[in-house]
Amino acid sequence: DTDGDGLTDGEEVHTYQTDPTKADTDGDGLTDREEIFTYKSNPLNKDADGDGLTDGDEILKYGTNMLKADTDGDGLSDGEEVLTYHSNPNKVDTDGDGLTDFEEVNKYRTDPTKADTDGDGLTDKDEIEKYHTNPLFADTDEGGMDDGKEVELGLNPLNPKDDIPTISFDKAIIFPRVQFATASANLLPDAKKMLDKVVATLLLNPNVQVAIYGHADRRGTASFNLKLSKSRAESVKAYLAQKGVKANRIITKGFGYTRPVADNATPEGMARNRRIEFIRIK
């Protein structure tokens, strides 16, 4: 056994046609004897299954079957998975999103190593099979809001008209004329539409905390207006919480008519003073 591979020189020459002076005739990283007796492969062919990976790499590096071009049976060869798509040749669904690696690569053009190719918060499978959105584009309807956030808010990710614009909390935000039922803290429909912008912004920025300040005009007693402005601020907080904003991110306070921004002697001034303010506190 000149090369010390475990085969006699006679066996190498007459039976297997291997080189008795080289322990690894085909140079694939496995000895001739290992190929013949352990792995049942061809010691003269360094890539027995023709998948683009050497037999040695399949056994020693990737743990794949060197006699099967597609070890996991997902439709992609082991060589394609390892060298081209960087997916796992031993797993049919590398990223666990419910789509096979083959489907992702050849049918949907998604990334088989990322469960959420476009990063919108929805898995590729959910986008394709459940919501019928584009798994390659975060905002399928191009309405200004990512598909995942639309689904979270109960909106239609295929309809741009229902996308809610967000707002900036870089400075105090004043909502004059936030409408409540007369002398009560019950929000009217138009007020809710305005507040939905706040909801969208807070849901998109989960670390932001805000204070909601309620203000009133001069009509009525000081105690009544103080109580009413506080109740209205609480009503706004309750609406935000109902829409998914955690209540511990919001504090409220009512100021009655103690902080006017306009003259209470005119109808226009009183209208400006009846307001809700949002102040970012964190």
Image (cartoon, rainbow, N blue to C red):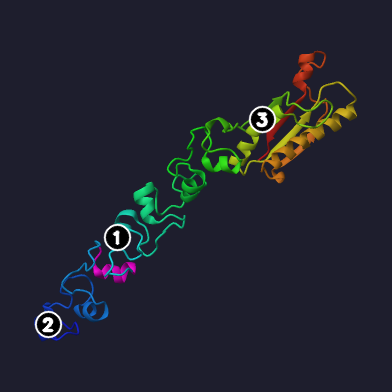
Q: Viewer-proximal residue, 208 or 55?
A: 55
The residue that disc 3 covers is 193
Name the element at disc 3. Answer: helix
Residue 210, above or below 28: above
Residue 205 visible, this angle: no
Question: Residue 211, position in %: x, y?
Answer: 72, 37
Q: CA distance from mark 3 to mark 2?
A: 84 Å
Image-based side of 261 in relation to 113, left or right: right
Amino acid carrying label 1: it is Ser
Checking the image for residue 77, the label placed there is: 1
> Tags 3 and 2 in contact by the CB under 8 Å rule?
no
Mark earlier in primary sequence (1, 2): 2
Q: Amino acid at mark 2?
A: Thr
Assign the magenta stretch its main secondary structure: helix
Mark 2 lies on residue: 15
Magenta stretch: give its range: 53-63
- What's the amino acid at mark 3? Lys
Residue 23 is situated, as x and y percent measured from the top left of the image, at 17, 78
Which residue is found at the position 39% from the left and 53% from the top? 112
Q: Is residue 57 magenta?
A: yes
In the displayed structure image, the side of residue 272 where residue 151 appears, left or right: left
Q: What residue is at 39 percent from the left and 50 percent from the top?
A: 111
C-alpha separation, residue under disc 1 versus residue under disc 2: 32 Å
Q: Quadrant of residue 251?
A: top right
Circle 1 packing at 10 Å, graded few (<14), some (14-19), many (20+), is many
Find residue 102 and name its label.
Answer: none
36 in relation to 211, above or below: below
Is 206 a magenta residue?
Answer: no
